[in-house]
Image (tube, rainbow, N blue to C red):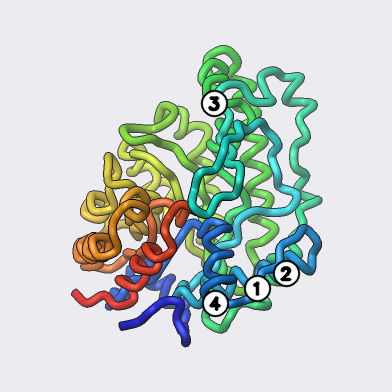
Amino acid sequence: MKKVPLSKPEPDFKRFVDVIKGNVIPKIPPLIELFLDFEIVREISKNVLGREWVIGEDIESRKKYFLNSIEVYWRMGYDCYRISGAIGLEFTGKGRPGKDTAPLSRGTRNWAEEGKGPISTWEDFETYPWPDPRKFDYWYYDFISKNLPDGMGILVCPSSGFLEIPLDTLFGYENLCYLMYDNPELVTAVFNRVGEILFSYYEHIVSLPKLVGFFQGDDMGFKTGTLVPPAFLRTHVLPWHKKLAKLAHDNGLIYLLHACGNLEQIMPDLIDDVKIDGKHSYEDEGNSVVDAKRKYGDKIAILGGIDVDKLVRMEENQLRQHVRNILDVCMPGGRYCLGSGNSVTNYVPVENYFAMVEEGLNYKP
């Protein structure tokens, strides 16, 4: 039985892409994650792999961090390393700090501002410190590309998404709901400015060596529906995803979307109009990966889906059986990658994360 971390990983990003596109039906599922929380990477790197852990804001410390992070993803069996974040692409807003009670605590956890963010008026719009695409810093993209093990590819995502930035960071959810009716011109202007900035970023990195695709996050729903009306998404959000998908496809890349919540009302838009290649983020209550595979598995790749609550709470043997049950449904026909329903958070027991990965590496129908 293969145990993780692997001693001799054999990543193959070309096979990964073929599985996403449905060109290959694999015997075992490729692995995918939106991300492993910083604390999970540190725990595996330092206490499992025995590597020196260095953290700091200077470039040399950042390089050592990326080398450790790459090693973790490689040894865990991933075909692709997802780069998230971009220096110079920070949208400043308000947060709601709270105590982080996770076993691998970071001390403080920040929650999105649900009330009122920094933009409510045209004056706020004009004085807001918008990121400047000309000042993006891509040094670590080049560094990661040059230091990936043979066979590994890169997926990229600079920040939260076309809905998330206006809703979570700039307006605040409650404030946006009012402004949609009280000042729709301002809302349109903000969504367009955000879209232009994000799209400019992607235009800058589209020729990055070893780039496999875009893996953009943009949470648009909750357990029973979309966060804002589907018509609003079709007007202000989905056209930007469509532009990104076209940019990816025009350059021989794939376009994967992470979007939490029940998006049944806009799934035809995402598949037929936006033309996503794969969809990520599932939870068993109201948005299960099993349902998604049965409904859409012949049209797009279904990514992840091991409910984070179960990943946290289940005993190891029970979790292993649950993962096998998911694989039995999702593997037939291909176009499935194994991973958590959202991300491997710092409150997921490392042994449970290892168990999930091992069940994938050792899967037999």
Cβ atoms at labels 2 and 1 below 8 Å apart: yes
Q: Name the residue under label 3.
A: 114
CA distance separating discs 4 and 3: 40 Å
**Residue drawn where x is 75% and y is 60% of the image:** 56
- Classify mark 4: residues with Cα within 10 Å, few (<14), some (14-19) or many (20+): some
Label 1 sits on what residue type? Leu
| Residue for badge 1 | 67
N-terminal label among 1 and 3: 1
Q: Do the residues labelled 1 and 3 touch (CB within 8 Å)?
A: no
- Ranked by sequence position, the earlier of labels 3 and 2 is 2
Question: Which residue is painted at 46% across and 33% down in the image?
Answer: 233
Q: Mark 2 points at which residue?
A: 63
Q: What is the CA distance from the residue labelled 2 to the residue labelled 4?
A: 18 Å
| SS under mark 3 | loop
Q: Distance between the residues labelled 1 and 4?
A: 13 Å
Mark earlier in primary sequence (2, 4): 4
Helix, strand or loop at mark 2: helix
Position of residue 326 in the picture relative to residue 243 (left or right):
left
Labelled pair 4, 3 in contact (Cβ < 8 Å): no
Q: Does the image show residue 283?
A: yes
